[in-house]
Amino acid sequence: MPDDRLIKADSIVIKDEVNLEAYFSIPNNLPDISNSGILATIIVDNEKDGYAIYPQGFRVRKGTVVSSENAFQDFYELSEIRHVDGIAFPFRNILYETIRNTFFHVAIWFAMFLLLVISCFYSIRYLRLGSYIDDLKSSSLTTVAIYFGMAGIITGSIWAKFTWGTFWTSDIKLNMSAIALLIYLAYLVLRNSISDVDSKARISAVYNLFAFVCLMILVMVIPRLTDSLHPGNGGNPALGGEDLDNTLRMVFYPAIIAYTLLGIWMAQLFYRYKRLKMKIKLKE
C-alpha cells in the first residue's frame, strides 16, 4: 500500500500450483484515493521460498473499502517479510521463470547496441579521414550487429509465445524493432548495390549514422510514448529492481560483455575476410 505499509490477507485459498485466492480487509482511512484509485503491490512470502513481488498487482478504488476505521488499527512493517538467501528469480506476472530469457534476448540486444555504437564511430572516422580500413571495420561491425538483431527478434518471439500466447503481437516495441531491423537490412542492400568503392564507403557511412538515429527513436523513444506489453517499458529493464534482481545481474551483465566480445570477434573475422578480398582484387 502507499508509504510501504503492508496489509496481511485475512484468508488464503490455494487453487493449484500457480494460483491462489486471497481476501483482504481494506481500511477506509487510506490517503489519496482518487476516482481512479491507488495501485498496490502484492507480496507473497513463505519460510521455504522467501518472497515474490507482483508490482502494482491490483487497484484499490472508491467503493471497495469494506472495513471501518476502528476495526483496522495497525499496518505491518516491511521487516516482517521473510527473506531466504540463495539463488532465486524476481517474480513478474506472466513471465515467471521465463524471465531467464533476459540472459539471451535482452543481453543480445544490448550487445547489438554496443556494436552499432562502435560501428558509428568508425563511420565518423571514415567521413573525417577517408580511410578504407575504417569503412571495412564499420561495415563488419554493422553486419554482425544485424545478425544480433535477428537473434534478438527470434528469441523475443519465442519468449512472447510462452508469455503472451503468440509469436507476434501488435505491441509497439515489437513493431518498432522490426522496422529498425528492416532499415538496417536496407543498409546491406544499399552497400551491395553500389559498385564504386568510394561512393559505397561514403554513402554507407552516412546511411549507417542515419540508421542508428532511427534505431534510437524507434526503439528507445516511441515505445515510451504509449503502452507496451514489455516489462520496464517506462524505464530500463536492465536497471529496474523489480525486473532484474542481483541474482539475475550475476549472469546478465557478464552475458552482455560476453556477447559484445563475441560480436567484436565475429566482426574481426568479417573485416579480415573483406580486406583479403580487396587485396586479391587489387592484385588482379
Image: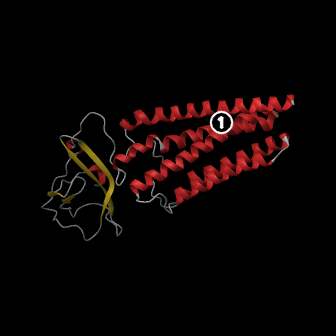
Q: What is the x, y in percent for residue 242?
A: 37, 46
Q: Residue at x 48, y 46 (%)?
A: 236
Q: Identify residue for label 1.
A: 118
- The amino acid type of the residue labelled 1 equals Ile
**Please, which residue is most extreme toward the left here?**
71
Q: Residue at x 36, y 36 (%)?
A: 247
Relative to 137, say whether 26 is above or below: below
**Front-most of residues 238 and 19:** 19
**Front-most of residues 63 and 256:** 256
Question: Is 279 situated left or right of 185 in this image?
Answer: right
Q: How is the image coloured?
A: secondary structure
Relative to 73, say whether 274 is above or below: above
Q: What is the x, y in percent for residue 148?
A: 57, 42
Q: Is residue 114 visible?
A: yes
Q: Residue at x 74, y 38 (%)?
A: 124
Q: Is residue 240 visible?
A: no
Question: Is 69 situated left or right of 117 in this image?
Answer: left
**Front-most of residues 224 and 179:** 179
Q: What is the x, y in percent for residue 47?
A: 17, 41
Q: What is the x, y in percent for residue 206?
A: 76, 45
Q: Looking at the figure, which quarter contains the C terminus?
A: top right
